[in-house]
Image (cartoon, helix red, strand yellow):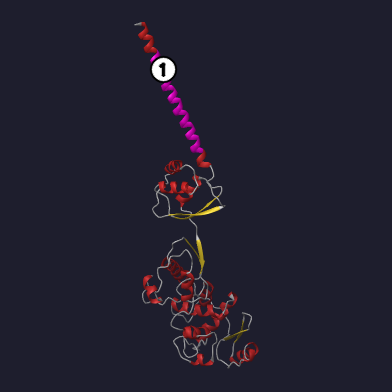
Amino acid sequence: MSNEKHSGSGLRKLLLRSVLGLVLLIVAGAAITLGMYQRFQTTDIRLATGELTYQLPEGASLNRLAYDLQQRGIIEYPRFFILLGRELDAARRLQAGEYVLVRGMTPRSLLEKMVAGRVIQHELTLIEGENFQEMLQRIQAHPVIEVTLSGLDGTAIMERLGHPGQHPEGRFLPDTYFFTRGTTDQVFLQRAYAAMTAQLASAWEKRADGLPLESPEQALVLASIVEKETGQVEERPQIAGVFVRRLQKGMKLQTDPTVIYGMGEKFDGNLRLRDLRKDTPYNTYTRHGLPPTPIAMPGSAAIHAVLNPAAGDSLYFVSMGDGRHYFSSNLKEHNLAVDKFQRGKQGIKLPAKEGPE
């Protein structure tokens, strides 16, 4: 009996030591794992270069992201990354898009960036004075914009945008726009259209009294002419003033850019006297009033100038050859200015004209 008691007691002690040893191993292992996990959170991700562009697909899970990052050699422990993601409640909040990963970024900061959706913002500037086709080509040529309107004419595009029957010219605000990879040309155009609509409405509310313009649309048409007439910001109110006074007096606008627009592809870079005499809906030498639509995309400055033109008595202007214009209040003075700055240059004889050059 005594030997059996000693034997049972020794067995229990051995079992207890084994259990305690196992517990100690588990605790030690857990401590080591916890330490590794904590270090993982604050250890820089691994990049071969200073930065890397990473595309997180739409609908990608936390697990998929973790193992993809491991496969690319960016992180070492995908299970730690998944655990960290769950700790940050990132699994359901990851936002698809294009991200810049940089040296010094940790798994924690990477996840925080993707949860916040701090994706790469690409940019594109629409140029003041470009026409609709030029603007559309610029948009569709951008490498990260998805083209969905290819082959459609202006009429069809405006239908897609929800504005059937509206001419596209002048309806999109020249500005710098920021957007993410995969933005469609249609979405981009909708933004630019909304921006122009808001800009035009705001400017119309602050317009000067007594203007010969019946609607924001007429203001847009005249602003497009001013935009094409000068690249000098400070001259736009003066040129707008000339056109406003001519409209008030019932004079023809007689502005070359409208004739050129009406010629379309027939314009070869040289405007001839016969072109000024050939009637089109856009020929302001043969027709009174405004052309039927804008002729380009006017910027905010041109719109403001048209709705707040400079005071004065000038009714004519002519290019001085350096980007600026000379303004005159009567035809005699204007023709003298034409003689000085334009007529006879490079052997070309220009006819006297009644209106702006």
Could one spot residue 5 in this view of the protein? yes
Residue 146 in magenta stretch: no
Residue 18 in magenta stretch: yes
Coordinates of residue 220 in the picture (x, y in percent)? 47, 77
Mark 1 lies on a secondary structure that is helix
Could one spot residue 310 in this view of the protein? no
Coordinates of residue 321 in the picture (x, y in percent)? 63, 83
Q: Could you say which is closer to the camera, residue 322 or residue 242?
A: 322
> What residue would you read off at disc 1?
14
Give the magenta part as a residue range.
10-38
Q: Is residue 253 above or below residue 172?
A: below
Q: Could you say which is closer to the camera, residue 23 or residue 162?
A: 23
Type of amino acid under label 1: Leu
Coordinates of residue 224 in the picture (x, y in percent)? 50, 78
Looking at the image, which residue is at 42% across and 50% down? Answer: 94
Horizontally, is 12 left or right of 304 in the view?
Answer: left
Q: Main secondary structure of the magenta part?
A: helix
Horizontally, is 123 left or right of 327 in the view?
Answer: left
Coordinates of residue 136 in the picture (x, y in percent)? 46, 72
Q: Is residue 149 above or below residue 321?
A: above
